[in-house]
Amino acid sequence: MKIIVPSPERNPSNEFSQVESEFRELEKICAQGKSCLEIGSLYGGSAKRLAEAMPGGGKMVCVDLGFEPLKKGWVTLPSLLSRLSSVQDRDVTLIIGSSSSPDVRAAVTALGPFDLVFIDGGHSIETIRSDYDKLKDNNVIVMDDWYMPENGKPDVTKFGVNAAV
C-alpha cells in the first residue's frame, strides 16, 4: 500500500453506512473494471469492499482527510489504514488531504483515469461540484448523499448532490 501526503498542512481540529443493495451495484461495476477512486474513505469499509470486488491486480485509490471534520475531528486514519492494508493482490494508494487541494488533485490525476469514481467526501455544494467537475471525464461517476423528500424535511433540491448536479 502506498500513502501519499502531498501537503503538511492539517486541520487541528459506524463502520459501513452505505445502502447495501445500492453498494452491491458498485461492486458489480468494480468487478468489471481495473481501477477505482473513492473520495472520502473515512473508516475504509467501502474502499475495502470496492477494492476486493475488482479483479486481482486492480488499482484502488482513496482520498481522505484522516479525520471526520463533522464529528469534532474524530481520528479515522488508524481504521482506514488497517482496512486498506488488509486488501490483498490489489494496488492500493491512500492520498491524505482534501480533494480540493491542488496537490491532491495532481496526485489523483497522475493515477487516473478510473473505471469507477465514488464521490463521498465533503458534503458542501461547492465541494461536490468541485469533485465532480475535476473527475467527470472518468468512466462511471457515483455520488453519495442524494436526498429524498420526506415529511418534515426542507427542500432537498438545496442540499448536497441534489443541488450540485
Image (spheres, rainbow, N blue to C red):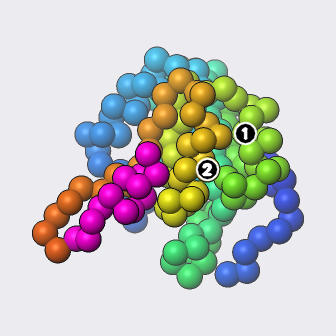
Percent coordinates x, y for residue 109 in the rendering: 74, 35
Residue at the image point whose x is 53% and y is 53% from the top? 128
- Label 1 crowding class (10 Å Cα cut-off): few <14, some 14-19, many 20+? many
Out of 93 and 140, give the one closest to the viewer.
140
Residue under the image location 79 percent in, 41 percent down: 107
When the figure is inspected, residue 141 is found, relative to residue 165, above or below; the finding is above
Residue drawn at x 44%, y 38% as measured from the top left: 142
Say which mark, if any, is on residue 95: none
Residue 40, placed above or below residue 153: above
Relative horizontal placement of residue 118, taking residue 107 as reference (left or right): left
* Three-letter amino acid code at the position of disc 2: Ser
Q: Secondary structure at mark 1?
A: helix
Q: Nearer the viewer, residue 161 or 38?
A: 161
In the displayed structure, does residue 59 sit left or right of residue 19? right
Residue matched to label 2: 130
Alpha carbon distance from label 1 to label 2: 14 Å
Left or right, residue 159 beside residue 135: left
Q: Residue at x 73, y 75 (%)?
A: 11
Quadrant location of the N terminus in the rendered image: top right
Q: Quadrant of residue 80?
A: bottom right
Instruction: Provide the residue span drawn in magenta.
Output: 153-165
Q: Return the residue at label 1.
A: 108
Q: Nearer the viewer, residue 18 or 157?
A: 157
- Quarter holding the C terminus is top left
- Per the image, label 2 sits on a secondary structure element best described as helix
Q: Position of residue 60 (x, y in %)?
A: 62, 35
Camera sees residue 75: yes
